Image (cartoon, helix red, strand yellow):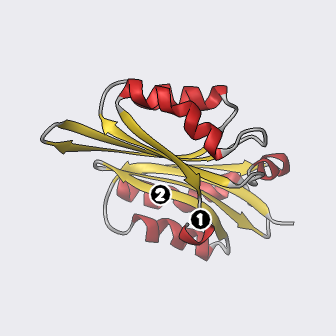
């Protein structure tokens, strides 16, 4: 039975961070399963799940990442995941892509995700981008989500229209094409 771990790391962006972190995993005989890694302005963040056929003492993993952390001013944390935590992570419904774009203003992400939460939509991934234009700052919000069985994409799209109008945004709801991932 494989053992699963969650690794989080963040610090100043520089070339080679992904290679350095994954080199440690490779040398320990671990397999990278799921990850999200991104740069936000000058900071780089890593969130990943890896597995191993043998259990590690967390101090061993901390020691393995200590040099990378020191050298790159990277804060690294590793957590052992339990079997129930791993089972929860499996998608139970087809994924839906919700995109919203318009003029940036405070509360856009909150108001849209709060509306989704009231509809029992489970958001699984969020990406936002702010851009400048002649008309002011633009904002793009991309959400990946699981809809409850009782809610179709078309019904969700229709229910979001009034909110989108109030926020001055365009919102679309469509299936995630598994090939495009």
Residue 33's x, y, as percent? 66, 66
Along the line of sight, the residue nearer the viewer: 11 or 114: 114
Q: In terms of secondary structure, where does tag 2 sit?
A: strand
Residue located beneath label 1 in the image: 177
At x 40% / y 28%, what residue is drawn? Answer: 165
Dot 1 or dot 2: first in sequence order is 2
Residue located beneath label 2 in the image: 37
Q: Residue furthest right?
A: 1
Q: In the rendered image of this protein, does residue 34 appear above or below residue 124? A: below
- Within-10-Å neighbours for mark 1: few <14, some 14–19, many 20+: few
At x 47% / y 26%, what residue is drawn? Answer: 163
Side of 129 relative to 67 (left or right): left
Residue 156, image quadrant: top right
Residue 107 visible within the image: no
Image quadrant where one finds the C terminus: bottom right
Q: In the rendered image of this protein, does residue 74 appear above or below residue 116? A: below
Residue 116's x, y, as percent? 60, 32
Side of 35 relative to 83 (left or right): left
- Within-10-Å neighbours for mark 2: few <14, some 14–19, many 20+: some
Image quadrant where one finds the N terminus: bottom right
């Amino acid at each position: 039975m494989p053992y699963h771990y969650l690794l989080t790391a963040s610090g100043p962006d520089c070339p080679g961070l992904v290679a350095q972190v994954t080199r440690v995993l490779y040398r320990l005989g671990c397999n990278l399963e799921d990850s999200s890694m991104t740069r936000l302005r000058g900071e780089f963040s890593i969130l990943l799940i890896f597995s191993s056929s043998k259990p590690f003492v967390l101090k061993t993993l901390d020691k393995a990442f200590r040099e990378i952390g020191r050298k790159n001013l990277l804060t690294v944390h590793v957590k052992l995941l339990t079997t129930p935590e791993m089972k929860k992570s499996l998608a139970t419904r087809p994924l839906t892509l919700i995109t919203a774009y318009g003029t940036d203003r405070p509360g856009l992400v909150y108001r849209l995700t709060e509306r989704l939460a009231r509809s029992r939509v489970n958001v699984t991934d969020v990406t936002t981008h702010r851009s400048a234009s002649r008309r002011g700052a633009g904002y793009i919000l991309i959400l990946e989500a699981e809809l409850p069985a009782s809610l179709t994409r078309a019904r969700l799209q229709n229910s979001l229209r009034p909110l989108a109008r109030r926020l001055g945004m365009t919102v679309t709801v469509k299936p995630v094409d598994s090939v495009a991932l």
